[in-house]
């Protein structure tokens, strides 16, 4: 894998080296996959949104104001695409496929009990309101600060803190119910 | 909660073909770095105007082209589009690699919404279109459409004879 800084790779792509974009795809796909899968809950939508985000990033690369922070810029595109996909899906009233992510993250060496726990986590995550799930994933799973989150989502810090807190409270309740069952 | 977060931070396996599929899409976009006009978009006024101008443009081309000398790059062909609201009009085609920045194929506003450019085109069969405001893909209303489409959008056909 090419260890060049993002800015150098962006510069190469903008100069016409299309194939250099593959380095950025390889570098950021895993993080994008994790967020998209947890946010959308199924592989098909996550895959579509990720591909869309990378293509949009490529097409808008000239407008990336800080190429050194390409990853953050790409992630902002992804978050917006997830929002759009989530809203579209809500309009279609599709069922949230909670167990697919759990299935994908499960591996054969894990016992059934652990797999069931992961499934419950995904189910609980899916039970959150989209804006709460978004705040929770960005804060606790992606490890962003509230200022970064505010910049990324366009939502105020106070509102984000409230959403993340409510998400935590709700998850605790849901998972406690599962554990005590 | 720590256990929950640790679980969610685990990597999510991706389809092995993901990188390949993304790069295939990127390469397609790289060949088509433009936002195409949607076939479902309402027809803009300037396209209606361009239909009226088609006959005039054809007559203009017939009158001017024979008088122009053939260059080493090809024979001069005049492209005309009526687009009163346009800010820029560019001719893109297989003869210039669909390059939307090629200065030799940038049409000039001749007044009254008439845009035209005369550029050397090599003999042979060609496909082309107009690019309006760097975003709208418009086939030439004065020329026949090609049977099959490039980039999913209709193009115009142009035949440049080898002999004067």
Image (tube, coloured by chain):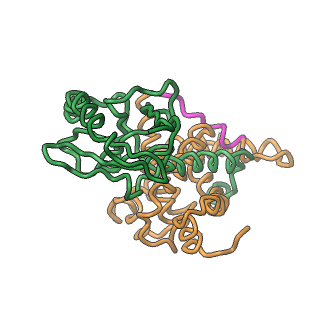
The magenta span reads A94-103
- The residue lying furthest to the top in this view is B147
- The residue lying furthest to the left in this view is B112
- Report which quarter residue A40 is drawn in: top right
Residue A57's spot in the image, x, y percent?
49, 56
Residue A77's spot in the image, x, y percent?
46, 55
Q: Which chain is orange?
A: A
Name the quarter where the N terminus of chain A is drawn. Answer: bottom right
Of residues B116 and A9, the one drawn nearer to the viewer in this rendering: B116
Residue A173 appears in the rendering: no
Residue B89 appears in the rendering: yes
Question: Which residue shows up at 36% across the image and 37% down it?
Answer: B37
As drawn, is A148 to the left or to the right of B132? right
As drawn, is A149 to the left or to the right of A178? left
Say if B38 sits above or below A140 in the image: above
- Report which quarter residue A28 is drawn in: bottom right
Report the magenta stretch's main SS: helix
- Report which quarter residue A31 is drawn in: bottom right
Q: Which chain is green?
A: B
Question: Which residue shows up at 27% across the image and 29% down it?
Answer: B42
Q: Check if residue A113 falls in the magenta segment.
A: no
Question: Which residue shows up at 63% across the image and 50% down it?
Answer: B23
As drawn, is B155 to the left or to the right of B48? right
Of residues B104 and B160, the one drawn nearer to the viewer in this rendering: B160
């Amino acid at each position: 894998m090419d260890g060049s800084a993002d800015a150098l790779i962006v510069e190469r792509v903008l100069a016409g080296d299309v194939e250099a974009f593959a380095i950025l795809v390889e570098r950021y796909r895993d993080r994008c996959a994790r967020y998209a899968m947890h946010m959308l809950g199924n592989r098909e939508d996550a895959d579509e949104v990720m591909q869309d985000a990378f293509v949009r990033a490529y097409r808008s690369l000239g407008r990336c104001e800080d190429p050194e922070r390409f990853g953050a810029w790409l992630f902002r595109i992804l978050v917006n695409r997830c929002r759009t996909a989530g809203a579209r899906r809500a309009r279609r009233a599709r069922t949230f496929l909670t167990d697919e992510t759990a299935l994908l993250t499960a591996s054969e060496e894990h016992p059934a009990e652990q797999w069931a726990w992961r499934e419950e986590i995904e189910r609980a995550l899916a039970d959150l309101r989209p804006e709460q799930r978004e705040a929770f994933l960005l804060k606790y799973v992606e490890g962003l600060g509230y200022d970064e989150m505010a910049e990324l989502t366009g939502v105020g810090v106070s509102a984000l803190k409230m959403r993340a807190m409510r998400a935590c409270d709700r998850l605790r309740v849901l998972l406690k119910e599962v554990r005590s069952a | 909660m720590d256990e929950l977060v640790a679980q969610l931070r685990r990597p999510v396996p991706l389809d092995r073909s993901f990188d390949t599929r993304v790069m295939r899409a990127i390469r397609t976009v790289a060949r088509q770095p433009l936002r195409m006009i949607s076939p479902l978009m309402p027809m803009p006024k300037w396209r209606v105007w361009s239909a009226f101008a088609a006959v005039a443009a054809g007559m203009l081309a017939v009158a001017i082209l024979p008088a122009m000398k053939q260059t080493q790059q090809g024979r001069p062909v005049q492209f005309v589009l009526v687009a009163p609201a346009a800010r820029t009009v560019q001719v893109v085609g297989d003869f210039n690699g669909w390059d939307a920045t090629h200065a030799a194929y940038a049409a000039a506003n001749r007044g009254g919404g008439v845009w035209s450019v005369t550029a050397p085109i090599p003999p042979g069969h060609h496909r082309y279109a107009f690019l309006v405001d760097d975003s709208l893909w418009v086939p030439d209303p004065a020329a026949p459409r090609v049977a099959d489409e490039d980039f999913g959008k209709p193009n115009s056909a142009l035949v440049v004879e080898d002999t004067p």
